[in-house]
Amino acid sequence: MKSILTSLADVIFPPMCVTCGVVQGHDDAFNFCPICFSKINFIQSNLCSRCGIPFTGAKGGDHFCSDCITSEMHFSVARAVGRYETVLLDAIHRFKYRGNITVGEILGRLMAEFAYPAVDIKKYSLIIPAPLHPKRLRERGFNQSVILARAVSKKFSIKLDFTTLRRRVHTTPQVNLGKKEREANVRGAFEVVSGGKIRKKRIILVDDVYTTGSTVKECARILMENKAAEVTVLTLARAV
């Protein structure tokens, strides 16, 4: 009966590509039409072994970038599905700024199904989304990182915890700030409550976009200070 109703719904409301809106077939990947899906620049090797930034060119293999060599990182590894550009950028904006939760759930499935280089999600015991301050949460109506993290949690049957890590300071939006300004903006903005829940846990920290990494670095720092065993960062997109 469920399949019949689904087929009927597809006739009345045919599935459309989440970015270009073209009517698509049942086999199109993650509700993207083949053309749009082909424009997503997925990130694989060659990349930084720590922060996951992709290198230009096809030579050299994976190795630390200059930033990871010279800067302290509190996460062990950071990986992203694709570059923050073209189709992926448009889809994220539809989700994050236009409130299209359906697109967000599709992007969450994309995150959950992606094979991240050098990350075995099954080895982790807790998934934590990057938190929003309550004021920002009221303005937006949802936390985009929670929606993405929920898909990863469901796929791998790993506990989702969106209460232990909190944003205690309402900061200026990061979007128009430079790297140093971003780092200063989020310094001390997060806190852990009920720290025993993360003690000795291997944690996946989920956010939507890794730009300079200021937010996830600060989140990871607080988690590690509260005795987490390890923090690995997964994001949907990476600004390059």
Image: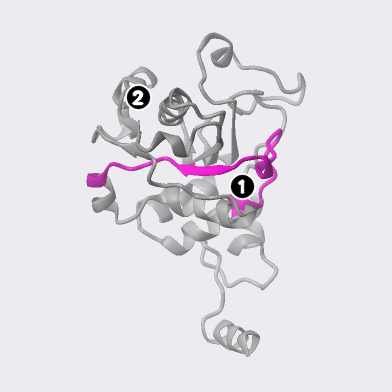
Amino acid identity at mark 2: Arg
Instruction: Report the magenta residues as a range.
Output: 110-135
Q: Is residue 176 above or below residue 84?
A: above
- How far across and down, in percent of the image, does residue 49 sit? 66, 23
Horizontal arrangement in the rendering, residue 217 relative to residue 7 (left or right): left
Say few, some or many: other residues with alpha carbon within 10 Å of mark 2 (under 14 / 14 to 19 / 20 or more).
many
**Residue type pointed to by label 1:** Ile
Report the front residue among 203 and 45. Answer: 203
The residue positioned 34% from the left and 32% from the top of the image is: 191
The answer to whether residue 19 shows anywhere in this view is no
The residue labelled by disc 2 is 182
Secondary element at image label 2 = helix
The part of the image, by quadrant, that contains residue 116 is top right
- Type of colouring: one colour
**Residue 210 sits above or below residue 145 on the image:** above
In the image, is residue 113 part of the stretch drawn in magenta? yes
Quadrant (top left, top right, bottom left, bottom right) of the N terminus: bottom right
Closer to the chain start, of discs 2 and 1, is: 1
Q: Which residue is mark 1?
A: 40
Residue at the far front in the pictured view:
196
Q: CA distance from mark 2 to mark 1?
A: 27 Å
Q: Dots 2 and 1: beta carbons under 8 Å?
A: no
Which percent across, then down, holds residue 24? 62, 71
- Which residue shows up at 52% across the image and 19% down it? 73
